[in-house]
Image (cartoon, helix red, strand yellow):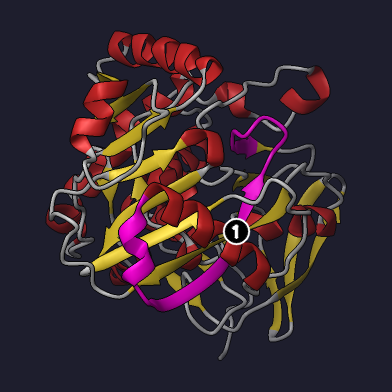
Amino acid sequence: MELPKTADIVIIGGGVMGASTLYHLAARGQSNVVLLEKEDLFGTGATGRCAGGVRYQFSTEINIRLSLKSLPMLERFKEEIGQDVMYRQCGYLLVATNEKDLATFRRNVELQHRLGVMTEWLTGDEVRARLPMMRFDDALGGTFHAKDGLADPNSVVMGYIGAAQRLGARAFTGAEVTGIRVSGDRVRAVETRAGVIETRIVVNAAGPWAGLVGEMAGVQIPIVPLRRQWFTTTPLPEILSDFPFVIDFAQALYFHREGEGLLIGMSNPNEKPGFDQSVDEAFELVNLEAAIARLPLLERAGRVSHLAGLYEVTPDAHPILGPTSVEGFSVVAGFSGHGFMHGPVAGKLMAEWILDGAFRTVDVSALDLARFDEGRLIREYNVI
């Protein structure tokens, strides 16, 4: 591997954020752009370990607006980028089993309707009718949006990387960044084990590792890594082909079809921040017991695979996009578990910021790094 000595823009991180930013810069004529990924393959960090869900159902206007721009980009991906991302609109069905969530869901649906996302409101009986094989005696209500669904993370990443390379941009694996040179409060160069690249613009798209990359530039970024895990089952012929992405919201427990079986995950409320990506076998049993209580036929299923990955969590569960106190050093990270679905539009927004000095497709100026010091947090409720 021979890295260039100079570049107009260096992107750190080869997941969906970095790949999308690389492509959208290249599509705007910026060929002297370099992406650096520390792993041996692109998209094997947080992006490659996510469940692949994409949805419109959020609780804040800014996240809904991001979905309204990003998910149609996934629908058009094959036509525009040349890669099938296997976008399957099976719908998300969020189930409320307590009064607090029920009231919040009602407010969320009102907001979604106001923004043109026509989420369905379901009574408890309607939830049970939609999920006859599941035990939801305690369901008080739920929400369903038919265009929510699933897409393939690897296909999105490699589609963007390939398209960017065809436009002249360069992307390298096995290129771990070891330092960022800053002088006079501006970026000067990026250091790697394979050499130094002089540049005046660096994009931190390092996901769960974005805080560590920020420290290299002397910038404090409030992003912490938090482990999440899931497992897949052997074929379950009883599961209908139109089975939705089901979320038992109070338990942060979810199910969706994966091949002929299911993918099942659950958030551990006692998980401590850290970079451990090994599967917690003890918590997997907790997950399995909760899943069987909701879907008893799982007692007859076997496990095919299991995997753990990292969320990149901010204090308000919203991402950070845009500049920092170091001139030329910007951030696109901290999506708190919904980065994959917003990756397409996030890369476009970063290209707009770098080239135009403004976010044009969606006004995400409120998602700046300074909001944490200034007390302008925007809290997302629908985070699993």
Magenta residues span 295-322
Residue 255 falls left or right of residue 269: left
Determine if residue 12 is in view: no
State the image quarter where residue 283 is shown: bottom right
Q: Position of residue 85 (x, y in %)?
A: 23, 61
Residue 88 falls left or right of residue 143: left
165 or 68, which lies in front? 68
The question of residue 156 being in magenta is answered with no
Which residue occupies 21% across, 41% down? 132
133 or 67, which lies in front? 133
Which residue occupies 33% across, 31% down? 56
Q: Which residue is mark 1?
A: 286
The question of residue 298 being in magenta is answered with yes
198 or 261, which lies in front? 261
Please state which amino acid type lies under the numbered disc 1: Val
Helix, strand or loop at label 1? It is helix
Which residue occupies 27% across, 29% down? 127
180 or 160, which lies in front? 160
Q: Position of residue 52 (x, y in %)?
A: 37, 56
Residue 17 falls left or right of residue 308: left
Q: Quadrant of the N terminus?
A: bottom right
State the image quarter where residue 22 is shown: bottom left
**Image position of 369 with respect to 286: above or below:** above
